[in-house]
Amino acid sequence: MIKTETLSKKRSGPVLFSEYKQGEGVKKALELGRENILFELKSSGLKGRGGAGFPTATKWMLTAASNSDKKFIVCNADEGEPGTFKDRVLLLEYPELVFDGMIIAGYTIGAKNGILYLRGEYEYMLKSLEDYLELLRMDNLLGENIFAGKDFTFDITIRLGSGAYVCGEETALIESLEGYRGEPRNRPPYPVNTGFLGHPTVVNNVETLASVPHILIKGGDWFRTHGTDKSTGSKLFSISGDCKKPGVYELPWGTSINELLNLVEAKNTKAVQVGGASGICLPKSQFNRVLGYEDAATGGSIMIFNESRNMLKILKNFMEFFVEESCGQCTPCRIGNIKLLEGVERIEKDDFTFSYINNLKELGRTMQAASKCGLGQSSPNSFISILDNFKDEIFGAKRKGEKNV
Amino acid sequence: MSKREYERIPVSQQAHVVSKPKDLTAIGGMVSVQINEKKITVPLGTTILEACQLNQIHIPTLCHHPDLCIAGVCRVCVVEVEKMRTLQTACSFPITSPIKINTSTQMVRKARRHIIDLLLSEHYGECYSCFRNGNCELQNLAKEFGVDNYTFGHVKTQRYEVDSSSAAVIRDMNKCVLCKRCVRTCIDLQEVGVLEAVKRGHETHVGTFLDKPLAEVICINCGQCINRCPTSALRANDPSDEIWAAIDNPKKHVVIQTAPSPRAAIGEEFGKEAGKSFTGELNTALRRIGFDRVFDTNFTADLTIMEEGTELLTRLKKAIVEKDESVKLPQFTSCSPGWVKYIEHFYPEFLDYLSSAKSPQQMFGALIKTFYAQEAKIDPADIVTVALMPCAAKKFECNRPEMCDSGFKDVDYGLTTREMAKMIREAGIYLPEMPKSHFDDPFGDASGAGLIFGATGGVMEAALRTAYELVTGREVPFENLVIEPCRGFEGVKQASVKLENCVEQYKFLEGVDLKFVVAHGTANAKIVMEMLKKGELNDVHFVEIMACPGGCLGGGGQPIPTSNVIREKRAQAIYEEEASLPIRKSHENPHVNYVYEKFLTDGPCGKLSHKLLHTHYVKRGKYIS
Ligand SMILES: Cc1cc2nc3c(=O)[nH]c(=O)nc-3n(C[C@H](O)[C@H](O)[C@H](O)COP(=O)(O)O)c2cc1C
Ligand code: SF4
Ligand code: SF4
Ligand code: SF4
Ligand code: SF4
Ligand code: FES
């Protein structure tokens, strides 16, 4: 049986790491009904926590509006972005939030099936998650007609990913679920219309779904009191790198980089990579920038580098990651990333011209605009931002006298 | 059979496409969009590319192919859609709301140029030493966008070994642009599934099962992938140098047979529009090149009808009169070597349903090195037989070990239409301006029945003309001998003719509704085989299957590009030529009768013809060791 009393958790935070009783959110959801759930969600301003920041209410409404007889809710627990490990914490320590979020989503959009797409490397938690689902089933919180009188049937299955970063991209994830190569699909049509097996599908990040129960219980307006106008609520940040207290923190959106560095006791910080390998790299002069969709956006990954780090090596590392992790189907990403990596290597060997580097930056902009999915669209971010923000370190002496970098 | 039963969703596309509305007049059936400055309305779900093509706005494409499902991978077709953050691919973007599209902004042009530049940077070799020079979509794009220096470098070494293990298809992945047209062709169009993208990231390449050589996997040699490859990454195994050597060798008597489909398409290689046959011109050109004799494969097509038709009647008699339950019906045609290899791999348990008759190409080879050698008093060891075919699989077929019934290799070389055109050009001949001439004796000009073998349904039509007449003593009851149910490009066709007032010998067929099925493309063959498995073909007597979409005229050796429009034009060329011929029934071909009188004296399916004109098959299965 599931313990309904609040588990004593060591973490604390404004939303996700606040108190919650298993099933509470679902109960509230049923009281509210579909319309009001969507209303609360909309007024909360919740945006996707997986990286792209799409308004969650809109995604659910589009799917709820479709009159297809089969719909799916997929929880994206592929957590592959380098430096991200906050979904792991939610799944290990707050599974009730994630699963309640999925049940609420299923109820709202009219899906009978939920799928948790679990990162392959998280296989070790598969057993405990399955056990948890089994307990929910025993309590009749999953399965046939789970809430008397509501005519609502819902169950959750867990599927293991196969280890490719790109499978976290929602359409590649769906391909992978269908048993195909994990390659992103053409969009439009979007998964909300044509998703898993061609049926309307909502794909949400673990954290997005975990936020929903709290929003319903305390209201969208309450949620909005945290964070900024454009980035409402709080966010889990996975903080790693050169600092004393790395880990997962729940902070309101709008926290500045400086505040964050203080919190984790980072010293001599030279650079902060916001948003993982596909994010941007900020120099000291920009540490007053704030975390949020409108400024420094991130799915949660924050990497801190101190003065002893070599920025070019860091960049090389990121580019090697993309060269390997691109699914390889589209030209800008498959070949573009290797060209950017070549550029880094030529800078290393001091075998380059500035016009060549500028060409590569232009190429990066093409990749951002013309790649098929978010991977290729964001892989040049670190290339462009590191070369722009750390010119002195990287180009050093060679730059003197040349102004066009 | 209703048409719906055999609608398929392409495997590599799944269900994520927007389907067009059935009723365009309904609200929301049409959408108005603005492309550049032009306002137009299109049916909901029309892609931007389709909308542009209808309005004479050119969009460059590379991975897109009219025969295949959407891929959206090359990205050269990107356009700007107002209010969208990124560029969108015209080939894949379905129009579902009123949008503003810009097809040539600075960003768009720059992106396209970058993409082409990237492709070139990984593209090994140079155009001047490439057989696709002048007919290459990558080269065209580079030219169109003025990509004339390698901004991002150019590979100096080959990354992949060229796979020339197959008798039919050579794969050089150093030239591959990963458009995946071949993958989609093999998986969706043919449902064979030999090719797929393997590995990830920069290591991605088109590979086979465990990256084994093509000769060791279940490739049926249809060559359809070659016809859709935009570059020289795929090509047929070209024997033209050996053929030149034979021609140049005064001791060798080099004989060529030409199939109908190459004749209906070779003009395209010389810049002519599809849809005109160049049979007479080709005969002259071949003689000028130095072939000693030029024969018409249609002669053995007529012979095939006699042999296969006799075999069918024998099977029917055994089944109906002798009640022999071991007789396999329906009888399947065996003249398409791609189809033969397909059934050997995928349905080996049904090989007994195949007619034992060889294909026209192989029958001819066997006759040339026996009957013709005798008549012409030439030592068959000195004869070199070449077959001009629309087909890649014919190269494999002539190399099958069982195809040596004459005591020699019956057909020495299978040559495709493309390779033939190359030889003609190399000889300094402009084909369309050649005077016309006839085929050589003793086989002469064949009947129209043999000619229509080139189009799907043609074998069936030819067989019915002969079988019906043999059985009833009357011509088939169709105007001008045109058996309409056999024609057209529907994937699986089914029809029947009633046999009434039969002649004495065939009284046992009195009242029988002779049922037949015609399919083209192995994806459709698969449908037919599944029907056979389920017992749904129990009352069918004869099935024609061609491995290539459209039949031989759409063969893997035919000129590139190919599309349904082009295939239809080639079919039209074939049917027009046939309508003008004096003899249009195989059994009326005087040369066929001459061969039966002079050489195959115990008649169709007799002892000698069994030795020379029939064959057996190999149970291959689909598991690769
Ligand atoms: C290359 C790539 C990897 C991604 N990986 C993840 C991931 O691991 N987890 C995740 O939740 N979203 C990931 N996303 C974002 C998803 O595509 C999708 O936007 C998200 O799951 C939607 O959920 P949300 O709206 O709740 O954020 C990835 C996107 C890209 C382009
Ligand atoms: S951008 Fe990269 S990962 Fe995304 S579809 Fe293209 S090749 Fe694949
Ligand atoms: S495949 Fe095309 S682009 Fe490549 S070398 Fe040949 S002709 Fe040139
Ligand atoms: S020749 Fe045919 S079967 Fe072989 S790889 Fe090409 S398309 Fe597939
Ligand atoms: S081999 Fe040809 S058709 Fe296949 S992916 Fe490469 S370029 Fe495209
Ligand atoms: S033609 Fe549109 S992406 Fe290739």
Image (cartoon, helix red, strand yellow):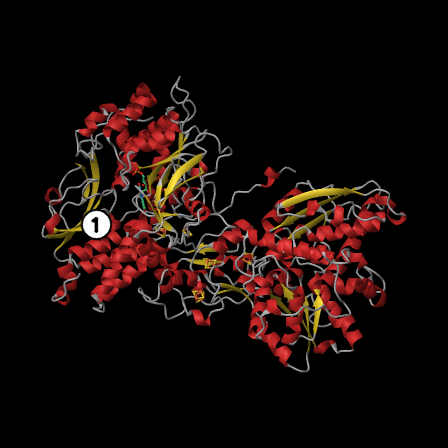
Q: Nearer the viewer, residue B179 or B356?
A: B179
- A43 or A401: nearer the viewer: A401
Residue situated furthest top in the rendering: A149
Per the image, the residue denoted by label 1 is A280
Q: Within the image, what quadrant is residue A124 found in?
A: top left
Which secondary structure lies at badge 1? strand
Give the residue at x 84% y 68%.
B598
Image quarter in which the N terminus of chain B is found:
top right
Residue B241: image location, x then y, percent: 57, 75
User: Would residue A10 appear left or right of B442 to someone viewing this image?
Assistant: left
Q: Is residue B327 rendered to the left or right of residue A281?
A: right
Q: Report the residue that reaches farthest toward the right.
A: B504
The answer for which chain carries disc 1 is A
Coordinates of residue A203 in the picture (x, y in percent): 35, 37
Question: In the figure, B153 relative to A164: above or below?
Answer: below
Q: Residues within 10 Å of mark 1 (few under 14, many from 20)?
A: many
Compared to A353, does A376 lie above or below?
above
- Residue B299 at x, y percent in the picture: 74, 63
Q: Is residue B395 above or below residue B185?
A: below
x, y percent for residue A312:
20, 60
In this figure, what is the number of numbered marks? 1
* Residue B332 in view of the camera: no
Amino acid, disc 1: Ile
Residue visible at 39% across and 38% down in the picture = A191
Residue projecting furthest to the bottom: B250
